[in-house]
Image: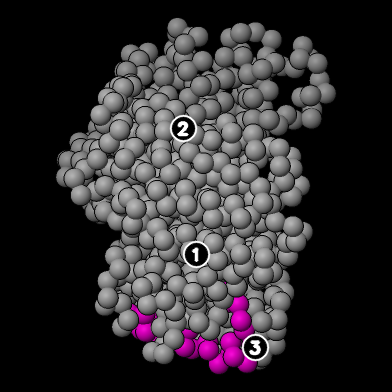
């Protein structure tokens, strides 16, 4: 993890130290306060530093001091990965000063602009810093080090060797520890082992001459990583223990990022040395540290890697893997307790992945009971876990947790699931073998436990690529899973409001777009080009969705809401062609059919505007929000959107629209998206459906995994809502009955017609 992990401080800008608030501004020695804050920042104690500098930037008794505090705050915010706030603070300081202080803030501003992929602007600020520096050669070296990551990979070795010569010529000084560390780590990643060792060893030696615990620990951490890469486990473990001893002597939250990485390496090394007990203890310490500072861990590291993919998921999975291996040696009661703890860990994985998808840690509630929540009789939750060497199945019923191990290559499971999902999405006839194989892996091993518990409702918490397949379409050779169980999914049980509906009364807001309006002028040029591409037309009349073509794979909402990124005007011919291609004639019939089933307003076409939709949600208490319009859920929240008649509705926009007080007090029971789809082949895209429900504060969401046939969608929706509103079925059972009706009709028996509809979240 090393220097890449920096702690967030999103809410800290609103915090003030009580001591400062109590003192009148004139009584404060602001220069001393700013120096104290800088010292805190350099020790890695960003929370306290940001508090002090925020206060100073607002209340210091001179303009120079306020702008100095703003510049130092910008540096702290940059370290805390708060890039927008950091840029604003640094620019204010840079623009105010004309002396060497301008150069002090120009350099981190240039680094920040590099991170924002603005190399030309970054070069301007870096040159300003060099021109104003007392030691321009040293600063020029630092600029080259910062630009290293943006060079083509084949050019990095030569640049690294030149930088090594230049850095060595500067002589030994504790001030050069950080450049040695950065150069050595870059050389390690480039495979230049000898060069990496030379500079990482120098970084460790020089850092020992400073009081910067964070830097000293980072230097040890980086050298230990080099030893681990080279298979020198004993040396790596020795250095890791040194780093742990150093980091544990500091304030734990201040060096939590280093401690997490060191404990994780210790777990890996001990496991490789067959010390399972020691490895499990190290994993546990890493997990506990993550939970201590999880809200402060950035969603994305400075190098663009997802913190979930790079760090959090492998730590949680490594911990769960070792815990599972110990279950077999436990007596029954202890084994059940252990399995409950494992499910709690799995729930943490699911929460963290959802936070990563949304780019927002605050949107996901913390664990409140997790897998310890009791399930009603007749209901079970299945967790398939794809571990490095096997598939684990954990089945939670109302009374106990069952465990089954499938000794199968997880890569083979992923491949089969991918082929099965593609076959169903494309309506291919040769899907049965994959459907049966997946059933044998995922459901057959737990069927006896399901029968013993008399399970009628099966909730699946899928892992990775398994999110792309409709579990109800798995086949045992005689019947589909949907014929035996009401199958629904959950992103995680701890993120599911499983309470029964607060009222039997059903009032719905139904909105749909059969003919698009001004929204076509809000599409990005890239999106419009993909839709207009020959052979990529959205199918009209027969199916809905943005075409089963490459056009669905890379669609993105416009760069800024309400305007085309290019700033050009789309011509009338292009507008009309887009409207024709995006027309959904079946939506009008669907909404008319639902009028006789669901009481409440109906917004069709020109009535389905962002403003009208907002007004309706603010004025009424709806149990159901039904939206029949184009939408795609991609690999993150930014690539997920829904079309209204007049504009694009992003996931954040959906959240903004649904902030009415009535919705806060009475959550929506169901968000239904009957013409939206998940992006093809992206195993994260189904998270978008769950994310939309979270943003809408809905207990559950009904969506589709691929573009659906128009008549099938209309029939499913009619039968589903009739089951919920008139027959008293729970949502999962109502969907099952609607799907069975299509399955039993010869013209719609193929899973292509009935299987894409998935219910995620509350099943009752």
Badge 1 local density, few (<14 within 10 Å), some, or many (20+)?
many
First in sequence: mark 1 vs mark 3? 3
Q: Secondary structure at mark 2?
A: loop
Quarter occupied by the C terminus: bottom right
Measured from the top left, where is residue 681 in percent x and y? 33, 60
Q: How far apart, in angstroms, are the residues tagged by discs 2 and 3?
A: 50 Å
Q: Which residue is mark 1?
A: 716
Q: Nearer the viewer, mark 1 or mark 3?
A: 1
Q: Is residue 493 left or right of residue 484?
A: right
Looking at the picture, does residue 489 appear above or below residue 247?
A: below
Q: Is residue 169 left or right of residue 360?
A: left
**Which residue is located at x 57 percent, y 31 percent?**
611
**Which residue is located at x 35 percent, y 27 percent?**
565
Nearest to the observer: residue 7 or residue 742: 742
Looking at the picture, does residue 440 appear above or below residue 708?
A: below
**Which residue is located at x 81 percent, y 20 percent?**
23
Q: Which residue is mark 3?
A: 453
Tell me the number on the disc at residue 646: 2
Badge 2 local density, few (<14 within 10 Å), some, or many (20+)?
many
Q: Which residues are magenta?
A: 434-459
First in sequence: mark 2 vs mark 3? 3
Pointers 1 and 3 in contact (CB under 8 A)?
Answer: no
């Amino acid at each position: 993890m090393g220097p890449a992990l920096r702690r967030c401080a999103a809410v800290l800008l609103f915090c003030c130290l009580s001591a400062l608030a109590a003192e009148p501004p004139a009584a404060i020695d602001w220069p001393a306060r700013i120096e104290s804050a800088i010292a805190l920042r350099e020790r890695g104690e960003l929370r306290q530093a940001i508090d002090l500098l925020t206060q100073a930037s607002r209340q210091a008794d001179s303009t120079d001091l306020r702008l100095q505090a703003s510049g130092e705050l910008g540096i702290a915010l940059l370290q805390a990965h708060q890039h927008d706030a950091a840029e604003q603070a640094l620019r204010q300081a840079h623009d105010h000063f004309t002396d060497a202080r301008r150069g002090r803030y120009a350099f981190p501003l240039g680094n920040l602009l590099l991170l924002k992929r603005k190399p030309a602007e970054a070069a301007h600020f870096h040159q300003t810093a060099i021109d104003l520096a007392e030691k321009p050669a040293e600063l020029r070296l630092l600029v080259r080090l910062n630009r290293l990551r943006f060079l083509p990979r084949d050019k990095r070795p030569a640049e690294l060797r030149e930088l090594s010569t230049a850095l060595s010529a500067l002589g030994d000084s504790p001030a050069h520890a950080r450049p040695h560390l950065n150069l050595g780590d870059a050389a390690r990643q480039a495979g230049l082992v000898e060069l990496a060792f030379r500079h990482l060893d120098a970084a460790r030696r020089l850092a020992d001459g400073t009081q910067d615990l964070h830097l000293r620990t980072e230097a040890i951490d980086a050298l230990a990583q080099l030893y681990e890469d080279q298979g020198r486990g004993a040396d790596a473990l020795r250095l890791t223990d040194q780093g742990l001893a150093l980091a544990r002597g500091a304030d734990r939250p201040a060096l939590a990022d280093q401690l997490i990485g060191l404990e994780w390496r210790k777990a890996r090394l001990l496991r490789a040395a067959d010390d399972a007990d020691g490895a499990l203890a190290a994993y546990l310490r890493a997990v506990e540290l993550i939970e201590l500072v999880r809200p402060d861990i950035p969603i994305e590291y400075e190098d663009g890697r997802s913190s979930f993919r790079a760090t959090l998921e492998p730590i949680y999975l490594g911990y769960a893997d070792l815990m599972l291996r110990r279950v077999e040696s436990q007596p029954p009661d202890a084994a059940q307790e252990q399995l409950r703890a494992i499910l709690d860990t799995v729930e943490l994985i699911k929460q963290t992945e959802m936070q990563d998808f949304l780019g927002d840690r605050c949107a996901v509630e913390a664990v409140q009971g997790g897998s310890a929540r009791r399930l009603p009789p007749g209901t079970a939750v299945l967790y398939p876990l794809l571990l490095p060497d096997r598939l684990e199945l954990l089945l939670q019923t109302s009374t106990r947790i069952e465990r089954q191990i499938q000794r199968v290559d997880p890569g083979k499971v992923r491949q089969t699931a991918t082929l099965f999902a593609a076959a169903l999405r494309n309506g291919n006839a040769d899907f049965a073998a994959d459907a049966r194989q997946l059933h044998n892996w995922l459901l057959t091993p737990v069927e006896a436990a399901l029968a013993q518990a008399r399970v009628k409702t099966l909730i699946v918490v899928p892992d990775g690529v398994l999110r792309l397949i409709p579990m109800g379409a798995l086949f045992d050779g005689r019947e589909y899973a949907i014929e035996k169980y009401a199958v629904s999914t959950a992103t995680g049980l701890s993120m599911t409001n499983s309470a029964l509906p607060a009222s039997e009364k059903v009032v719905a807001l139904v909105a749909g777009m059969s003919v698009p309006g001004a929204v076509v002028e809000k599409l990005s040029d890239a999106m419009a080009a993909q839709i207009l591409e020959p052979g990529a037309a959205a199918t009209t009349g027969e199916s809905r969705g943005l075409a089963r073509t490459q056009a669905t794979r890379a669609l993105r909402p416009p760069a800024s809401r309400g305007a085309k990124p290019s700033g050009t005007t789309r011509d009338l011919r292009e507008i009309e062609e887009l409207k024709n291609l995006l027309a959904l004639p079946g939506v009008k019939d669907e909404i008319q059919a639902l009028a006789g089933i669901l009481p409440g307003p109906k917004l069709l076409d020109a009535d389905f505007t962002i403003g009208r939709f907002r007004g309706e949600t603010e004025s009424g208490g709806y149990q159901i929000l039904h939206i029949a319009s184009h939408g795609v859920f991609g690999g993150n929240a930014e690539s997920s959107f829904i079309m209204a008649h007049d504009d694009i509705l992003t996931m954040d926009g959906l959240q903004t629209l649904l902030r009415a007080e009535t919705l806060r007090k009475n959550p929506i029971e169901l968000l239904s998206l009957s013409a939206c789809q998940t992006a093809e082949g992206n195993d994260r895209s189904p998270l978008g459906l769950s994310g939309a429900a979270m943003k809408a504060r809905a207990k559950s969401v009904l969506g589709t995994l691929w573009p659906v046939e128009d008549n099938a969608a209309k029939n499913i929706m009619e039968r589903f809502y009739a089951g919920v509103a008139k027959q008293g079925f729970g949502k999962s059972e109502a969907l099952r009955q609607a799907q069975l009706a299509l399955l039993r009709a010869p013209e719609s028996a193929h899973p292509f017609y009935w299987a894409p509809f998935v219910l995620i979240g509350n099943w009752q």
